[in-house]
Amino acid sequence: NDPGTRPSGTTAEAAAEQVAADFHALYGAVPEGVWAAPGRVNLIGEYTDFNDGLVMPLALPHAAVAAVSRRDDGRLRIHSAEAAATGQGVVQLDVTTLSPGSDTGWAAYPAGVVWALREAGHAVTGADVHLSSTVPTGAGLSSSAALEVVTALALNDLYGLGLTGAELAVLAQRAENAFVGVPCGVMDQMASACCTEGHALHLDARDLTRRQVPFDLAAEGLRLLVVDTRVKHALGDGAYAQRRAGCEAGARALGVRTLRDVPYERLDDALARLDDPTVRAYVRHVVSDNQRVERTMALLDAGDVRAVGAVLTDGHASLRDDLRVSCPELDLVVSAAVGAGALGARMTGGGFGGSAIVLTDAGLADKVATAVEEAFVQEGYPEPRVFTAVPSAGARRLR
Ligand code: ADP
Ligand code: MG
């Protein structure tokens, strides 16, 4: 029952050989290379990236691992071990006829990256791709960005495109926005492409400036638990776009380009100028969450990691009460964890299900995890999946 010893995803390095062997069995040739790109949890700064704001994600050990070879005949063949387990075989496409919104199912994520690279003028003439991922899907841990970034990095290396991690992340975001049709911000792709082991990534979504912030939990005797509630409420589908529209309405009403241009020190003035109570609440969340990112960075710089707990719990209250993107299961993780002595907790990712994070003394981690699990049993919720988040490496070539 120790969250530290529960399965936390095979490391990408250990999976590389199997993925290469499966590629060989599938396509009849050794792959030119194998790459990995991780999922992420966001420590703080939620619904801020599309407002040109601040975020602070860290990469998980869970990753998408892809074996890839070039082709020069325009064919794109894509295969996933996890999709295969549900009966889906190789998806065959033609790079010259890829178009946004074409119904390619899960393969839209990697295919969208090929489309975005070609749209940007890069001569990608085809590929064979086989991938396998340990990132739980739809759990708010960014399995989609892992798929995109691993594809982008592989093609960047194989075709000698010379793009940076940040440039690949922006192209991957374009793939998800324009090709797949999901209006996400840039955090997930930047986290997967640019995070480094032992650090949280302080990212300014306005200009993509970033700082690797040392985040050594073990040295402080602390643990960051991820609790995947395994629920996904249908409500979440339209909610993201609705929150985005509300934030844009707030920026318009305040006469600024984005909510990033509202300084925290002027928040009360700004709120007083907004008539719509919903928009006012969204603005309060976004501006205060930017401030919570800055506060978290200052605390980490000062070595006061424990104090980050209270910032997380404040952030949860803001997401629950102002942005209204939480749900009973996520609220229960937070109340049960804090009730059992955790330093703080909050939902992470888009909400309406998915995952929460909990910062706790390592010595209390078992007790906290058990308290959450028992609270879920009590409410008749599905059994949550609890694991320890170890700040891990971003996208990289494995072989
Ligand atoms: P999240 O990114 O939070 O996990 P999304 O809804 O953005 O959730 O992305 C999940 C989707 O990504 C899945 O429904 C599937 O289409 C695709 N996906 C993720 N991992 C895999 C995989 N290993 N194989 C095939 N498709 C995957
Ligand atoms: Mg996603």
Image (tube, rainbow, N blue to C red):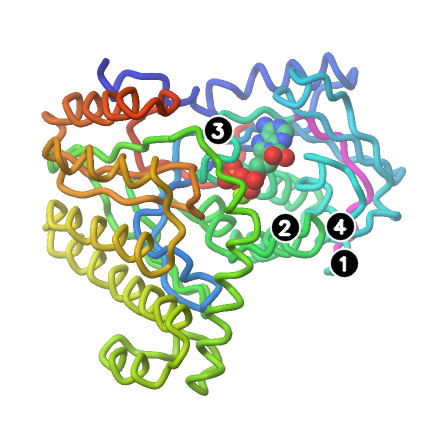
Q: In this view, does 179 lie to the left or right of 368?
A: right
**Segment colored magenta:** 122-130
Above or below for 40 versus 137: below
Can I make out residue 144 in this image?
Answer: no
Q: What residue type is labelled 3?
A: Pro
Q: Where is residue 271 in the image (x, y as percent from the top left)?
A: 31, 79
Residue position for label 4: 115
- Residues 129 and 155: in front is 129
Please tell me whether mark 4 sits on a helix, a strand or a loop.
helix
Task: Place residue 74 in its image quadrant.
Answer: top right
Please tell me whether mark 2 sits on a helix, a strand or a loop.
helix
Q: Which amino acid does label 4 sit on?
A: Trp
Q: What residue type is labelled 1?
A: Glu
Residue position for label 2: 176
Are there few (<14), some (14-19), or many (20+) residues within 10 Å of tag 4? many
- Residue at 40% across / 68% down in the picture? 278
Q: In this view, does 102 lie to the left or right of 113?
A: right
